[in-house]
Amino acid sequence: MSINPNYNLLVVSTSTIYGSEFLAYIKEEFVNFIATDELLFVPYARPSGISFDAYTAKVQDALGDRNIKVTGLHEYQNKKKAIQEAKAIFIGGGNTFLLLKTLYDLDLMHQMRVQVGKGVPYVGTSAGSNLTGLTIGTTNDMPIVYPSSFETFGFLPFNINPHYLDPDLHSTHKGETRETRIQEFHQFNAQPVIGLREGSWLKVSQGAVKLEGTLTARLFKPDREATELDPGLINF
């Protein structure tokens, strides 16, 4: 599986882990990765309950002590130009269907692909991570809106399942597990899926994918037993 060697991606399962503030656990990696003091934030994954301004301010508050200026894409009249001029791009979590629909409705998908293809650093958390794969077919979100396509940026030749959860052997819940849902996905789709547990992330550079953090990830392929991926370079 080949990956554009220009891609610089940080594909993060979640922005917040238990007992930690927003972006705190990933802040050092985040700041070092983007290597700039200007960040373009895409807040479109958030439905009502938090405004785009408030969501952008939350990112600014998290990174302000590192003298990083965060600007929300919603603030620009010419959003394509804002993406063209971005030094680094961050797409946060929320509802993946809403995020993708908004980007399609605003005709921003192509421009985003072009800029990241030039090497502009891209950070995605949760919904923003889902968009780095081939489709949103393995998101955990409910389809509260209907995008024109489930096809995403396609930076990676596989799908992401963020917030991946292992079965709780002590739970009385009898519904489908996350693994079962992904196996159902593979009845109709061929691409691999990586289940990223909270606190883990993928770092993509020079065409290589590296699992970082202290946890393993779960790799699913059609008609095969799922396997555990140790932190380090991932070979398919």
Image: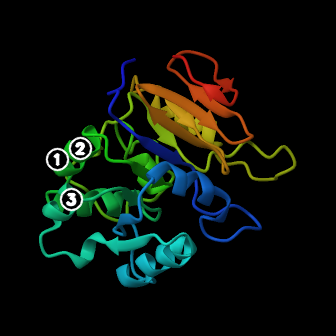
From what the image shows, is residue 202 above or below residue 42? above
Q: Amino acid at mark 3?
A: Glu
- Where is mark 1, residue-wise? 110
The image shows residue 102 at horizontal and vertical percentages of 25, 64
Which secondary structure, mark 2?
helix
- Where is mark 2, residue-wise? 113
**Which mark, by number, is residue 85?**
3
Position of residue 75 in the picture relative to residue 67 (left or right): left
Q: Quadrant of residue 42?
A: bottom left
Q: Quadrant of the N terminus?
A: top left
The image shows residue 19 at horizontal and vertical percentages of 77, 68
Which secondary structure, mark 3?
loop
Out of 36 and 150, give the one closest to the viewer: 36
Query: Crowdedness of circle 1 by 10 Å Cα count: few (<14), some, many (20+)?
Result: few
From what the image shows, is residue 58 above or below residue 78? below
Point 44% across, 35% down: residue: 159
Mark-to-mark CA distance, 3 and 1: 15 Å
Q: Quadrant of residue 3?
A: top left
The image shows residue 164 at horizontal and vertical percentages of 63, 45
The image shows residue 34 at horizontal and vertical percentages of 44, 53
Can residue 151 be seen?
no
Q: Amino acid at mark 1?
A: His
- Sequence-wise, which precedes: disc 2 or disc 3? 3
Q: Amino acid at mark 2?
A: Arg
